[in-house]
Structure formats: structure tokens, C-alpha cells
Amino acid sequence: MLKNWNPAEVPPKDEVKERLKQARAKLYELQMKIKEHKLPVLVLFEGWGASGKGSAIGKVIKNIDPRFFKVATMSAPTEDDLRRPFLYRYMKQIPETGKFTFLDGGWMEDTTKECLEGNLEGEAYEKRIDSIRRFERQLTDNGYLLLKFFMQIDQKEQTSRMNRLLAQEDTSWRVSDFDKWQNEHYKKCRKVFNRYLNDTNVPASPWYIIDAENRRWAELQILELMISGIETAIKNSSRSVPILQNVFPMAKTPKLKDVELEGKVLTDEEYKEQLKKLQKKLGEMHNRLYRKRIPVIITYEGWDAAGKGGNIRRITEALDPRGFEVHPIASPEPHEKARHYLWRFWTRLPKDGHIAIFDRTWYGRVMVERLEGFCSENDWQRAYNEMNEFEKELSDWGAVIIKFWVQIDKDTQLARFTDRQNNPEKQWKITDEDWRNREKWDLYEEAVDEMLQKTSTEFAPWYILESVDKKYARIKALKIVIEQLEKVLD
Amino acid sequence: MLKNWNPAEVPPKDEVKERLKQARAKLYELQMKIKEHKLPVLVLFEGWGASGKGSAIGKVIKNIDPRFFKVATMSAPTEDDLRRPFLYRYMKQIPETGKFTFLDGGWMEDTTKECLEGNLEGEAYEKRIDSIRRFERQLTDNGYLLLKFFMQIDQKEQTSRMNRLLAQEDTSWRVSDFDKWQNEHYKKCRKVFNRYLNDTNVPASPWYIIDAENRRWAELQILELMISGIETAIKNSSRSVPILQNVFPMAKTPKLKDVELEGKVLTDEEYKEQLKKLQKKLGEMHNRLYRKRIPVIITYEGWDAAGKGGNIRRITEALDPRGFEVHPIASPEPHEKARHYLWRFWTRLPKDGHIAIFDRTWYGRVMVERLEGFCSENDWQRAYNEMNEFEKELSDWGAVIIKFWVQIDKDTQLARFTDRQNNPEKQWKITDEDWRNREKWDLYEEAVDEMLQKTSTEFAPWYILESVDKKYARIKALKIVIEQLEKVLD
């Protein structure tokens, strides 16, 4: 896109001035429409060093109420960032509905820099591009407007701007070593930029190359593109999005009704003996995981009263408390609901070497949210693939993902509900909602079966824990966790 | 406290076993009481290297449902932490109501380490102790249970534990260089620890020295102390807390009725000319602030429709978008309401060199929360001092704090409300709540006057912006900001 790039002719000064005036007023007006339509807008500024990204953002935001935007300057990733998946620090920054986030440099800058340093080539580069495309598509599919600007100046202009900045002590610090390097290796950089722009120029979030030699003209191009982008997005706001075909290798999973529950029991003695042995083993493994910096994600879904809590405790008892975290997932808070539904899980990812245990998960999307109508049919149907993609991202990052479905039958649930109801110490565990959910057992079973079939990928398969005898389920969980961790530790 | 420390005799093995059994069951039971009484519990583990902090935490949490606690391991502060006030990274970790946070090493470790490195002495040390005491008192005054354990072992025991760990490759990484240094300089360390323990041994959050030579006995001491701490805190849960006398030097502030509004106007020409000049100047200063790493906090309070938003915009227009953030403050979200009311402001503090602008602030505590009964009388009466302490902390950190009250009269407000109501583009700015608040003008005026009198400290005084003519108020705000920044830049 940059090679042989032919910018449009710059309009006469008066015309630019007049159109700028109109565009500024229009953007100011549109911010209320954005709020009204609950449109989240992510504006990404990429481009050459000294191309004026920062000052362009500064001009754009003058037309927006400060309550409606955030500017995020993505400097070099921190040590903490480096211990999470590549996209983590960007996902953290996505705006709430009705608001803007402006990113001064983003995933393009990081990616192309790694390329230029020779640290991202061949298959690794392709994987990166894949995950960036998925990330962007997931945003736009979920109603985000993603605007991507590349600020283009030629080598001569870059040289002269940098010289101007370097000439004064007050501004010289703004020119980084990387900027200088870029200027000296302009052609090489252009090639890498060009390839990246081509590879990520997708219909739902195309690249806009901004002719940035003239600052006012650059501002005008950006404003007009933002305006048309917003207007299009508002028109699209209630459209439904195509469901994508599955591209991931799937593992086999049974239907719930075919899960044999009978006979899956342990005596107290068997249980105690095995528990002790397995917990000891897991404890030792945790140490090695930590040192090898392998992240682990264990998720629990299952019927109410199936025994998730107790099962989780038998895992955590074995672990060093400094190296794990349990995330109980309830209904989302307002600031979570106002973002991509996976945001609250992205932001809870473990550091490498750490274990995150989720007590209920993102799969709420295709269970409770589906059945209670908290999202549209298009939303939950799309979610199977989105969650597979999310887990693929985690798996590629190096994470071990272990997903448990804790299974009991309807009679066992009734017995446990009744017991909770009659036992003052356990009453807090049972709510009217539990009883209401129970009435929908068959609908849930259907939804769970569909979920198990569609999201049991080879890299993140589901495991069924037969939990009529909770002891049996706990031992099985421990064994599976140990087995999976052994694979990566050996 | 450590010198001449005489631990109690260790009870016989059988007794320890029996009491442990009871204590574990009791703690398990108490977690529901904690939830019920909405008690937040912060448990701090400090102590010698190899004294078993981590493993003690591991044992305690076995008795707690993983949904009710978090363990935070405070390793060395990150670069981001270092760019905030010292207590920032601890404040971030405080638990929600009804939950536990366990800290593996905390503000004692950081502080004593700095002492031992020779970087914290004399007045600086005393300032640090002051701010730690205030921090702890603010937690306990606001209903937190703060339990502080120091795990004590003697030099011989430490040596032998460390040798055991170092003997095996699998565990040797657990002994840090600092641990080794500590062991070699045991007496020096004990002196520093001892002084710190004495300096921070306050009635509401006393230190408990745990005899940690025997692990089961250590566990028992901790469990029993936690239990009695929790039981006491529950008994205290509806008590009111003494209001403290003011200890800060105060600046003079007028009563609102004495603020002269008439004649504070600018012509369009005066306004335009001054605006341009002042914004240019502020823009240049922003650069220098950034390089000198001075943090700036600008806060806005004022009557509805007084012109806060437009005033803020005239400031932000002048700033580099990469160096400031505007925080619009609405009513707190559930996870914010479940913590100390200053938590959501602590976590929004700027990095050094950055500017944070708050559109409404912590002063909501003594205005809307006071008048609408969202907190108790004791809460808001205590808040004046708490907010002064908070700002003192920020000021000691090096922050410039500029607090604006945007003032108009009742008639002006009515005119603006009516205008908003009649103008379709502005209707979103006016709600029923605004009209309801207007009815309480006199009560608010009384509350504001009290606030201005009690929180206009020398290090963070209030400035009144007369805003019947918004242009006048904007120019005045710019001038004050520039004037205050000049003081620290020169």
C-alpha cells in the first residue's frame, strides 16, 4: 500500500479551512450520536516517527468532550505486559460503549518493530498476523468501530522534521533512537510496513494512509474519515454478523445424557489416600511450572450444586498461594458489560508461570446469556468460534487450558438443593435463581451439549467430571490436571 | 518489640493438634459471618526471609472458600509503581467488603529495605511512618480489619532453613540475595525491624509477633489471632469513629455568599486573545513538567451547569494528549462501592509527569453522599480530615494539586437549565436529578461552605472560579494553573 502510493492532491488552502470547520463541528455533533447508539470507537494511529501522530490526536480530541475519550500512549511493553499474551495490553485499552479510545501507536508498531529487529519471521509472523486479524474481527463483529490510520511522510520530510526537533534542546528528546534508525533505513522499514499493511487490510477495518506532510490537510483527512466511519457504523448498528465456519481441529466429547454417572464412586479411604498423593505431586509440579514460566488456565462450568467449589479447593490446597488466583465469575459489572464480553476474562489472565482458576467462565455467553436473552441469537451463535479463537490465542501463547464440566443428574441436584435449604449454614448457597434455573434443566442441557460439541478443540478440550460422588470428581480433576501439566513439563 | 522478645512456651503436641482442628473449623465458619457483616479483611504477613510467610498463607487459605480471598505477592515495585505514591500499589490491593486479601510482604518490607540500603533516614523516614500510620488508620476507621503478623525466627534457625533450601537445586532459587544479606546482618536488620514495629504498633492495628520456629504452632497462633480479630471487628461493625482534630495549616477561603460574581466578565476579544496566549504557555509548560516528572492533579467541583466541562476543555486543548487524562466521576460501580471510598481515586492517580483532571471528585463524600444519606454522618464528618490526609500524601509525593470550585448564582443556573431543556442538542445534559438537586441549593451551599473551610489546606487550597461569564472563569482557571505550575518549574 505504501509502495507506489499516490496521494491525492492537496486542496487549496481556503477549501481546507472551510472543510475543517465543517468537519470539526460535525464530529462534535456525532459524539452524542455515539453515546446514543452505544457505539465504542477505537482509533489507532500508526506511522513513521515524526509523522505527527501525537499532534493529530491532540487536534482530533479538541472536538470531543473529555468525558467521552481516553488517549493511550503505548510505550514499550512493561515486564508485566511481556508475561501475558501479546494482545493483552491492547485488549485492556478498548473503550466502553459510547466512548473513544485513541491509541498512539499500537499492535502494528510492536509487530513491525519485532520484524525489523529480526525477531519475528516466517511462521511466527504469520501466526501473529492471524491473531491480529482475529482480534480486529472480534472487535468489529462485536460492534466496535475500529479506525486504523497510517501517517505517511517520505524520507526527506522525515529527515527535515527530525532535524528541526533535534536542533532544540527542548524538543530533541522527542526523537528516539528508533526514529533515527528508521530514518536511516527508510526503505527497509517501508517494506516491512507495507507488508504489514497489506496483511491486515481487511474489509471491516481497512487501513487509511494519511498524507501527513501538511498538518492541516492531515487533520482534515482524519476528521472526514472518522465522520464517515462513524456514520457507517451507526447505520450498521443493528445488523447481524455472519457466523464463521469452524477451522479448528475438534476433540470428541459425549452428549451429557451418555455420560455414565453410576458406579463412579470412591470409598473414604481410597479418596484420602489418593488425595494426599495427588496433591503432593501437584504441589511439586507447581514449582516447576513457575520456574518454566508456563501459564495455566483451569475453568469450571457445571450444574448448580454439582460441587464446583469443593472441587476447586482440592486443587488450590495443593498450590503455592503466591502462584494462583481463583476468579469467581458473577454477572458482569457495568464497566464490564460496556465492553467486549471477553474483556473481563482477558484482563484476568494469569502471568506466565501462574495458574488462574475460573469458577464459571466466558461460556456463560452460550448458556445463561443465551437462555435468558442477555445477548442476541447472533451474538451467542458467533460466540462458539470467538471463544475457540480466544483459547487458541492462549494456547499459542503457551498456556495449558483445562476445561471442566461438572456433571450430576437432576435427582442429585434436588437432593443437594433440599439439603442446602434445610441446613442453616448452607442456606446462603441456595437462591431462588437456582430453583428457576433448575426448571430450565432441559433447555440448559441442550445448550451445554451444543457448547461441548462446538468448543471442545484439540488445544482446549472439555473434560467431564462425574460428580454424583464428589470425591470421585475431585480425584478425577486432580488426575487430569496432573496429566496435562506433565505433558508440558517433560 | 523484637529485642528481649520472650515467646510463650509451645504447648504440647496434642494440644496444638486439637486447637488447630478447632481453629480451622472456626475460621471456615467465620467466613460467612464476614460476608454477612460485609467486613473486609486485610492480612499482612511480614517477617524474616525463610520464616515461612508463604507457607503460612497457604495453610490459612485452606480454610477459606477461594471465592472469598485473594493472595497478593508483593515483589519488587514495577517501574509503573515507582512512578506513583509509595502506598499506591498497596491501596490497589485492598479487599472488597466480605473478602480477604493476604499480602505476602508489604509496606513494612519495602520500608525497612529502604532503611537498610541507607535510602530512608531522618525526616524522610518519619514522613514515611506518618503516611503509613495514616493509611492504616484510614483503613481501620473505614471498617477494614487489618491484621499484621511478623514471623519471627532467630538467626540460627534462619541459617539452617536457608541451608536446607540452598542444598537442593529445586528449592535454592527461593533464597534471594537479600535473604542471604539479611542472615549475615541479622542484628542490624533486627534493629531496623524493631524500630519499624514500634513505630507502627498502633491500637487499631497492632503487630502480632508470631513465633515461627515451629510451623504448626505458628499456624495455630495465626489462626487464633485471626479468629479473635474477626470476632472483635464484627462486634465493632456499627460503632462510630472519633473525629480527629485538624493538624494541617489552612488557607483562607471565602463563604460562597461572599464571592463577588458581578463584573467578572470578559469581552470576546479579550477572551480570544488571552486564551490563545495562555494555552500556548501552558502547552510549553506541559513539556517541561513531563521531563521533570512532576505529577499534577486538577479537580473540578461546582454547581450543575456552572460550566465545568467547557472549562476543562480549555485546559486540555493546550495539553499533549499523551500526557493527561480526564476522569469523569459518576456514582461508584459495585466493585468501587465495596471498597474504601478513596480507592477509586487512588487507582486513578496520574504517573509522575502526567496530569490527571477530575470532573467531580472525592469531595462527593461531603456533598452528595452527605446530603443524600449515602454514607453515615460519622463517615462524612471524618472525611474532611481523610481527604486532607490523602492530599497531603499526594503533595508529599511531589504532586501539584489545584482544586476548583466553579461558582454561579441560582438565577444563572435556572437560565442555563431552561436553555438546555429547550435545546434538543443539549437536552442530554439535563436530567430530573439536576432539578431535584437544585431544590436543595441551600443545603448544598451549607455543605460546600463547610467543605471549603475544612479542606482548603496550604498544600491543596481551593480556588473559586466565578463562572456567570464562562469566559472569565476559563481564563482565570488557566491563569491559576499556569501560576501554580510555574512555582514548581522554576
Image (cartoon, coloured by chain):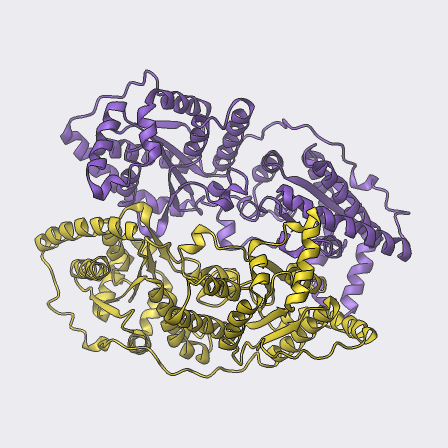
Chain colours: A purple, B yellow
- Residue at 48 percent across and 68 percent down: it is B340
Of B412 and B85, the residue lying toward us: B85
User: Which residue is pictured at 51% across the width and 46% down the height?
Assistant: A80
Q: Quadrant of residue B331?
A: bottom left
Percent across and percent down for residue A18 are 17, 34
Q: Write down the quadrant of residue A146 in the picture.
A: top left
- Residue A411 horizontal/vertical position (percent): 83, 54
Drawn side of residue B121 relative to residue A152, left or right: right
Identify the residue shown where x is 32% and y is 62%.
Answer: B398
Residue B376 on image: x %, y %: 47, 77
Residue A351, position as x, y percentages in the image: 57, 46
As drawn, A256 above or below B73: above
Q: Which quarter shows the N terminus of chain A?
A: top left
Q: Check the picture and name the quadrant holding the C terminus of chain A.
A: top right
Count of numbered circles on the image: 0
> Which residue of the protein is positioned furthest toward the top in this rendering?
A4
Residue A360 visible at all:
no
Location of residue A167 by image quarter = top left
The reply, left or right, for residue B358 in relation to residue A476 is left
Decide if residue B19 is on the left or right side of residue B126. right
Residue B394 visible to an observer of this rendering = yes
In this image, B124 relative to A445: left or right? left
* B95 vs A380: above or below: below
Q: Is residue A224 above or below residue B126?
A: above
